[in-house]
Image (cartoon, rainbow, N blue to C red):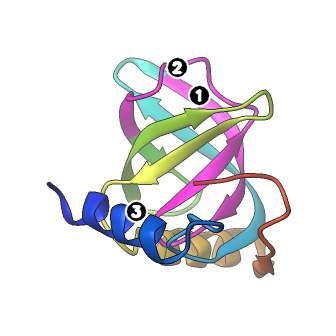
Amino acid sequence: MAWGDIKRVLSNLVRPNNRRTYDRLSVDSEVQLSCGDTIVSCRIADVSAGGAFLTPGPDLPIGTEGVLRLPGAPVAAAVRIVRRTENGVGIEFKRDGVGAIVAGWVRAVSGTGPTKQDDTAQPSV
């Protein structure tokens, strides 16, 4: 079992009403999701150390793996689509803590800083 899976199981036991392992930050920036030959432009609506929420959601199945890129930033993050809603898709970063780097990308490229989001707002990963 991967470390991320273990953290999720423990988080559900300790905080059953709030399954989130990390706080989410509201952001708004254009991103590109590359999955094989498919490249989708969308917006990143929120981000945490473990994942993010993309709108509008690319029409790709849960479990699809890809690379998230922020235009103007030289770094790419490996991701996996983990859930879908009518508003978008939740993605999980394949490496822990990458969301902090992504939030930094958004600040650097868009010139705006993220704000902490409460758990009653739009769902994310």
Give the CA separation, mark 2 to mark 1. 10 Å
Q: Is 28 on the left or on the right of 34, as rendered?
A: right
At label 1, the amino acid type is Val
* Residue where numbered disc 1 is placed: 40
* Residue where numbered disc 3 is placed: 75
Q: At which x and y percent is residue 124?
A: 66, 53
| SS at circle 1 | strand
Q: Is residue 70 above or below residue 3?
A: above
Q: Residues within 10 Å of mark 1 (few under 14, many from 20)?
A: some
Give the CA separation, mark 1 to mark 3. 17 Å
Tell whether position 30 is magenta.
no
Sequence-first disc among 2 and 1: 1
Q: Which is in the foreground here, disc 2 or disc 1?
A: 2
Q: Is 78 on the left or on the right of 91, as rendered?
A: left
CB atoms of marks 2 and 1 within 8 Å: yes
> Magenta residues, as a range?
39-66
Q: Nearer the viewer, residue 109 or 123?
A: 123
